[in-house]
Amino acid sequence: MARKKSMDEVRPGQGDDASSRRTPMREFSRSLPMSLLRAREAVMRQFRPSLRSHGLTEQQWRILRALTAVDEIEVTELARVAFLLGPSLSRILRDLEARALIERKAAENDGRRAVVSISAKGLKLIEAVAPTSEAIYAEITRRYGARKLAELHEMLGVLEASLAGMGSADDAAVEADE
Amino acid sequence: MARKKSMDEVRPGQGDDASSRRTPMREFSRSLPMSLLRAREAVMRQFRPSLRSHGLTEQQWRILRALTAVDEIEVTELARVAFLLGPSLSRILRDLEARALIERKAAENDGRRAVVSISAKGLKLIEAVAPTSEAIYAEITRRYGARKLAELHEMLGVLEASLAGMGSADDAAVEADE
DNA sequence: GGGAGATGATTAACATGTTAAGTGAATTCC
DNA sequence: GGAATTCACTTAACATGTTAATCATCTCCC
């Protein structure tokens, strides 16, 4: 049996004898970023071995997946869709192009923009990985429940939208400091 | 520099003229790892500036936070609690120790194990960051709703638990051994 | 008690995340 | 119409994620 044992070996409340009145903070496991990270890792752990066996990282897969949905796409737009930062995307595109999985050309009317598309070889790779990937996703859906999964998607989307306008918490911090 | 809302520049279904019968895959935005990643990034985007202004990365903060909950803790256990892989933790502990934010000693009865604890300087740093951090968290809670937030936590926990035993060939081998 | 294997932690090597700076092409503005 | 600015990447630099290898203990078993 693997990882999922008990969290209670941490013994919270043990360190309170050292300092008397510390700023109270949430219990660690209740931290939202942590919950999201753990959940995501639990999901990705299922996919990584399959991707790796095909010589792909998670991000490379994301890019190829995004490219199958369009004929061609500009780099900035691809970064937005695949949710990667520019620098990461630059490096990965260089690698994918060297492996002939994608093709790149300059935009016709704008010398700054680059247009990317998936190659035949890239499509073949996608089709080789897709069945396993879909099977894993189906098993996840079966275990968690399709309805619950849809609900989770919805709640995550709302969360993202809720925080959209919450601009630089920098300013709030500065205000609080002064 | 607000995020634009238009997702429809992607024009899904445009690439279907190139290859006739491709393996159908989920729409990208419905991918669970992607949803989790986007939500987590939306949250972390709020905290990063404050942490950075105090010279801390997200992971360094996680470690210090975890250390405040215990008197001392072994490295492996800390990795589990802070949800970091061993190699990452090793590097970060080296850095935090050099900055005198933590202390490290060998376990009494086992020369392999190392025991870590937060230093007075580390505690001071935590207390300097905590107010801002809590304020941000409170604002997130206010925007999203406390009840919904608790429900999201619950759903994420269930998801993680649902996938716990879902062996990736790796765990299958382990089970076969036992 | 000594060697084989297991275990805890680190190091190595490569890929990505993150921020800042650089480069070359388009736009703006006088 | 040319300098200043903006824009679309790209590089650079550093920190972490991820897997494999290494190293030093420790345990077990003979």
Image (cartoon, coloured by chain):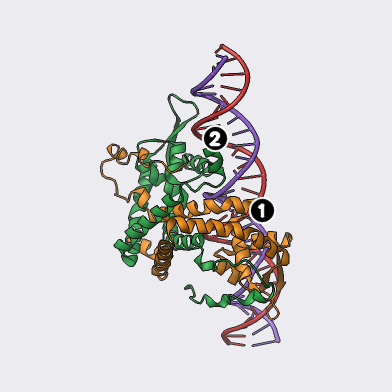
Chain colours: A orange, B green, C red, D purple
> In the image, what residue type sits under mark 1?
Gly
Task: Identify the residue at horizontal 72%, vertical 63% (top origin).
Answer: A121
Pick the front one: C20 or D20: D20
Q: In x, y percent, where is residue B167?
A: 52, 46
Q: Which residue is mark 1?
A: A55
In the displayed structure, does residue A123 sit left or right of residue C18? right
Quarter where residue C29 is shown: bottom right
Task: Identify the residue at horizontal 68%, vertical 73% (top origin).
Answer: B20
Task: Identify the residue at horizontal 51%, vertical 77% (top origin).
Answer: B6
> In the image, what residue type sits under mark 2?
Asp
Q: Is residue A79 visible?
A: yes
The chain holding disc 2 is B
Same chain assignment for discs 1 and 2: no
Pick the front one: B7 or A147: A147
Q: In x, y percent, where is residue A96?
A: 69, 61
Q: In x, y percent, where is residue B131?
A: 32, 55
Helix, strand or loop under label 2? helix
Residue density around tag 1, few if under 14, some if 14–19, many if 20 or more, within 10 Å:
few
Q: Which residue is mark 2?
A: B177
Pick the front one: A130 or A96: A130
Quarter where residue B152 is shown: bottom left
Q: In x, y percent, where is residue B121?
A: 38, 42
Task: Identify the residue at horizontal 41%, vertical 45% (top origin).
Answer: B64
